[in-house]
Amino acid sequence: MTTTRQTTGSLLARALVCAMLGLALGCGPTAGGGTVTPGTSGGGGSDPDPQGATEGEGMGELHKRLDELVGRERSLRPAAASDGGKCEQLCDLATSICGVQEKLCDLADDHPDDDAYQGLCREARNECREAQDSCVRCVEANQNQSVAPP
Amino acid sequence: MKIRGQFGFGWLVAMVLAACDPEAGDADATLSPPDARISLHQVRTGAPTREGLAFIGAVARIHGDADAAADLDTRAAALRRGLSLPVPANLPEAEVLRLELATRLSETMGQRPEGVAVALDLLEPMLVPENSLPLDRASARALVTLGDLAMTANDDALAAGSYARAIRVMSALRKELEQ
C-alpha cells in the first residue's frame, strides 16, 4: 500500500515536472515559431544555429533552465509524495464516508417520521460533504505547491 | 377466589402468548432508537518483542490461509484459529489485529443466512457503545460490517447506529489527518 502510494506520488511529481518542462520548452518566449524570422527556413535549412533575436542564446538558456527545473523537481519530490499520500488517504476516507452515508440515509427513508434516523442522516450528509471538500482542498493545495515559484 | 383464579389463568395465557409472539422481539428492536455513541482511543505502539512479532506473523499467516481457502467453512476455521491465538503482553496493536480477524470472520459467516445471528453474536459485544474503540480504519470497517449484518437481521436501530458510529470514526481519522 505504502509502496503504491510512494510510486503514485513519485509518478505525480514526475508528471508535474514533465508538464513544467513542456511548458518551458513549448510555450516560452524562446521557443516556437513566433521568434523565427519570416521568410527563412526556421531551422529547417543547412544552418543548424538558431534563428531570430531570442534564439541566439536559446540552447544555453534552455540547458540552464532545465538544470534549474530538475533541481527544483528533486527538492519538491519528497513533499509532493507525502502530500500525495495524505490526499489519497483523505479522498479514500471521503469515498468511504459517503458510501456509508448512502446506506444510512436509505435506512432513514424507511423511518421518515423518526427524528433520530433523520438526524443521523443529516449528520452523515454533512460529514460526507466536509470529507469531499477536504479531499478537494488537499489536492488543490498539493497542485499549487508543485507549480509555485521557488 | 374463583373469579381471581380465572383472571389469573387468563393473564397467564396472555403472557405466554405474548412471549411466544415471534415478532414481539423484533418490534422492540425496531422501536428502540439508534445508539450512535462512540468513544475512541489512540492506538499505542509498544516496544517490539519477540513474542509480539511472532503473534503478528501468525496473524498474517492466518489471513494468508483465509485468502487461500477454497470455501467459506475453511476460511472461517482459519479465522477462528487466529482469534484463539494467545495475545502476548505489551502488544497494544493486538486489539486492532483481533478486531480485523473478528470482522473478517463475521463477514465470512454472514455470507450464509444461518450464519448472520452467529456473526452478530461475535461482533456486537466487541463494539458495544459503552466500550472505547481504537482510532483506526479497522474500527470503522467492523462497525460497517455490524451495520450490514443488522440490516440483514432487520434490526434497523442497530444498523443505523453502527453506520453512524462508523462515519464518526472515519470523520475523526480525517480530522487527525488534516492537523
Image: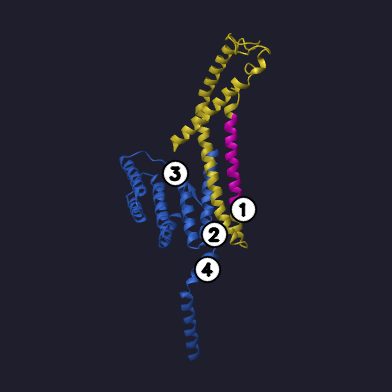
Chain colours: A yellow, B blue
Q: Residue at x 41, y 55 (%)?
A: B106
Seen at 40% across and 57% down, the residue is B109
Q: What element carries label 2?
A: loop
Whether A22 is drawn above or below A121: the answer is above
Q: Which mark is residue B34?
A: 2
Q: How many angstroms separate mark 2 from mark 4 (CA)? A: 14 Å
Residue B16 seen in this snapshot: yes
- A73 horizontally vs B53: left or right: right
The CA distance from mark 3 to mark 2 is: 27 Å
Hey, which residue is sitting farthest right in the picture? A38
Q: Examine the residues drawn in magenta and state their main secondary structure.
A: helix
**Picture quarter with the N terminus of chain A:** top left
Task: Say what amino acid the circle numbered 1 marks.
Answer: Arg
Mark toward the viewer: 4 or 3 = 4
Measure the alpha-carbon separation of dots 4 and 3. Answer: 38 Å
**How many angstroms separate mark 4 from mark 1 (CA)?**
25 Å
